[in-house]
């Protein structure tokens, strides 16, 4: 891809400062836009300030009951699609879609909605005791070899005791705007090969799912009986572990020949999905801009052995480690020591959405006469 220099874009001249008339016009347009936004919409300004895929400013309304119910009854395979469509319906700007955001931008967006419309406290989050917590419990209960402490360990392991904590969302400080946005990764090899990948977007999962399911539709139908049999068998084993009276001999089991064919099918399908994922994020290949090609066209390129999986995994790990959005560590009150501690916590979209479904809007007043 050709490098754009200042002379290419501005013909060698530096752009002049905007005139007073231009600044006035821009201000009037912003005021007009604000006046058009209906009541009930809030202004959303994410911490990365428009440096990545989300716009610097956009507007959203609260969920309604139907939104939450539709998400609650969604099948696992439909959750991302329904979530994306539901969030898009909440956004006032028609040209803004969360499908184009990064996962972290989507999570911070929903975090903002929850904090604004629901409750500044997220209650009952599952807590994993730290070494300091266990040392505290040992000291309080006669040491690590005492019967009391060993019982505590058993209760934690079996889930008989599940400590929880609350998060004060007002104390959660997102990462600051990055000095430089990292949205692409360029791969250059000693033999001269080069390619470029783009940072994943939330909607990529939907595109990939549709592409893989369409391509493998016939094989999926062919192996559906075995797939369902294996799901039923796992469900019965889970219920047995939880104490239900299940006849283990009644658990369905495919033949060795069927399992061999099934495992071969799963392996090939997974390999296809991984190649399609690399293709989806590919935006430049051997110096050629491929960002506007179809996924089918890019899939053929992604089969090139130069596009190796280990390199792609490193790139994904680097993208996932980019410090934008909500922090990886927060300050909470330990439910064990009752002291404020810094705790590693990953804000996950499904957890925040579930909290929305379990909470009433904050500040709602009901009067009975």
Image (spheres, rainbow, N blue to C red):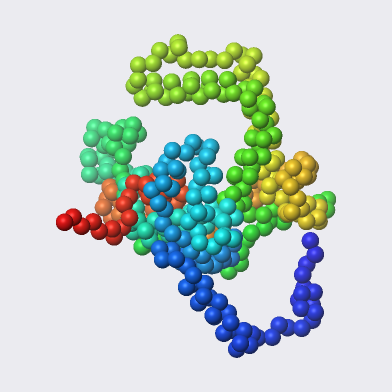
Residue 325 position within the rendered picture, expressed as x and y whole percent measured from the top left? 50, 59
Q: Residue furthest top?
A: 249
Would residue 145 appear left or right of 130 to someone viewing this image?
Answer: left
Residue placed at 43% from the left, 63% from the top? 41
Would residue 145 appear left or right of 302 to someone viewing this image?
Answer: left
Up-down relation of residue 242 to residue 106 (above or below): above
Residue placed at 41% from the left, 43% from the top? 69
Q: Residue furthest front?
A: 369
Quadrant holding the C terminus: bottom left
Residue placed at 47% from the left, 38% from the top? 74
Residue 8 position within the rendered picture, expressed as x and y whole percent measured from the top left? 80, 74
Q: Is residue 189 visible?
A: no
Up-down relation of residue 174 to residue 252 (above or below): below
Along the viewing direction, whichever of 315 and 12 lies nearer the viewer: 12
Would residue 281 appear left or right of 28 to someone viewing this image?
Answer: right
Quadrant holding the N terminus: bottom right
Q: Is residue 192 visible?
A: yes
Residue placed at 77% from the left, 45% from the top? 297
Quarter of the image where one finds residue 118: bottom left
Along the viewing direction, whichever of 351 and 147 lies nearer the viewer: 351
Q: Residue furthest bottom?
A: 20
Q: Report the label total.
A: 0
Residue 250 position within the rendered picture, expressed as x and y whole percent measured from the top left? 45, 12
Quarter of the image where one finds residue 207: top right
Along the viewing direction, whichever of 251 and 311 lies nearer the viewer: 251
Would residue 346 appear left or right of 264 to someone viewing this image?
Answer: left
Residue 269 position within the rendered picture, expressed as x and y whole percent measured from the top left? 66, 31
Quarter of the image where one finds residue 261: top right
Q: Residue furthest right?
A: 191
Up-down relation of residue 16 to residue 295 (above or below): below
Up-down relation of residue 181 to residue 70 (above or below): below
């Amino acid at each position: 891809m050709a490098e754009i220099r200042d002379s290419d874009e501005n013909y060698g001249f530096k752009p002049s400062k905007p005139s007073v008339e231009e600044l006035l016009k821009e201000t009037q347009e912003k005021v007009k836009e604000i006046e058009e936004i209906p009541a009930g919409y809030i202004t959303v300004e994410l911490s990365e300030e428009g440096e990545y895929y989300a716009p610097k400013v956009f507007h959203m309304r609260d969920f309604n009951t139907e939104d939450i119910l539709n998400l609650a009854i969604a099948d696992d395979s439909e959750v991302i699609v329904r979530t994306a469509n539901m969030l898009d319906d909440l956004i006032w700007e028609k040209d803004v879609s969360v499908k184009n955001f990064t996962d972290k931008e989507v999570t911070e967006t929903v975090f903002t909605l929850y904090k604004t419309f629901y409750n500044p406290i997220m209650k009952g989050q599952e807590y994993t005791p730290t070494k300091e917590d266990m040392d505290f419990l040992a000291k309080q209960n006669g040491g690590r070899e005492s019967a009391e402490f060993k019982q505590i360990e058993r209760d934690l392991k079996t889930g008989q005791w599940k400590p929880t904590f609350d998060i004060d969302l007002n104390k959660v400080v997102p990462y600051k705007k990055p000095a430089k946005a990292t949205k692409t990764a360029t791969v250059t090899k000693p033999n001269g090969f080069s390619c470029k990948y783009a940072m994943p977007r939330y909607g990529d999962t939907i595109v990939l799912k549709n592409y893989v399911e369409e391509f493998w539709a016939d094989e999926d139908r062919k192996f559906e009986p075995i797939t369902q049999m294996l799901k039923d068998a796992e469900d019965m084993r889970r219920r047995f572990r939880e104490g239900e009276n299940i006849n283990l001999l009644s658990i369905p089991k495919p033949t060795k020949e069927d399992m061999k064919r099934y495992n071969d099918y799963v392996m090939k399908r997974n390999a296809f999905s991984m190649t399609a994922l690399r293709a989806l994020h590919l935006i430049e290949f051997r110096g050629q801009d491929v960002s506007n090609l179809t996924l089918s066209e890019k899939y053929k390129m992604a089969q090139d052995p130069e596009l190796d999986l280990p390199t792609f995994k490193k790139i994904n790990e680097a993208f996932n480690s980019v410090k934008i959005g909500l922090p990886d560590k927060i300050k909470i009150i330990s439910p064990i020591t009752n002291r404020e501690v810094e705790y590693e916590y990953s804000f996950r979209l499904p957890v925040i959405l579930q909290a929305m479904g379990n909470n009433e809007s904050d500040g709602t007043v009901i009067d009975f006469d």
